[in-house]
Image: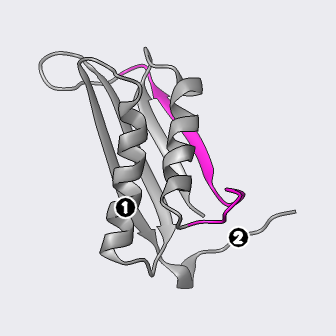
Amino acid sequence: MPHCIVEHSESLNSELILPLVFSGAMESELFEIDGSDIKVRAIIYHSYLTGPEKTDFIHVTLKILSGRTVEQKQVLSKSVLAQLQKLELKNCSLTVEVMDIERASYSKLFS
């Protein structure tokens, strides 16, 4: 765990973004040391509005099992944001949020 869901405008390249999100999650040191539990995927938006002018954006939602402290969530969020800044994008909004998945209702099957 986590599930890292990257939403971004169509003019940006997922192949450049996803490894940075993975690296940010790894650097937080909150997950398996080999990264085997980190899942990163992208949703590309062709139709969107960003206020009066259409600008690029990257929004990352990090869904993690509940039980982490606020400080741990801040480290994770800031680590992913720092990695995204390496893209040096102009006129692009970068946002990251961490959301809890309730352990009691989470189910998983791997076959």
Q: What kind of element bears circle 2?
A: loop
Between circles 2 and 1, the one closer to the viewer is 1
Q: Considering only vertical position in the picture, is 17 above or below 27?
A: above
Percent x, y for residue 31?
A: 59, 66
Q: Considering only vertical position in the picture, is 55 above or below 30?
A: above
Percent x, y for residue 80?
A: 42, 47
Foreground pick, 102 / 78: 78
Q: What kind of element bears circle 1?
A: helix
Q: Which residue is mark 2?
A: 108
Q: Which residue is mark 1?
A: 75
For disc 1, the neighbor class at 10 Å (few under 14, some 14 to 19, many from 20) is some
| Residue at the image position 36 percent from the left and 43 percent from the top | 81
In what quadrant of the picture does the C terminus appear?
A: bottom right
The numbered dot on residue 3 is none
Q: Quadrant of residue 97?
A: bottom left
Foreground pick, 31 / 95: 31
Count of numbered labels shown in the rendering: 2
Task: Check if residue 92 falls in the magenta segment.
Answer: no
Q: Residue extending furthest right? A: 111
Region of the chain picked out in magenta, as a range: 31-47
| Residue at the image position 67 percent from the left and 61 percent from the top | 37
| Residue at the image position 67 percent from the left and 56 percent from the top | 35
Say which amino acid is labelled 1.
Answer: Val
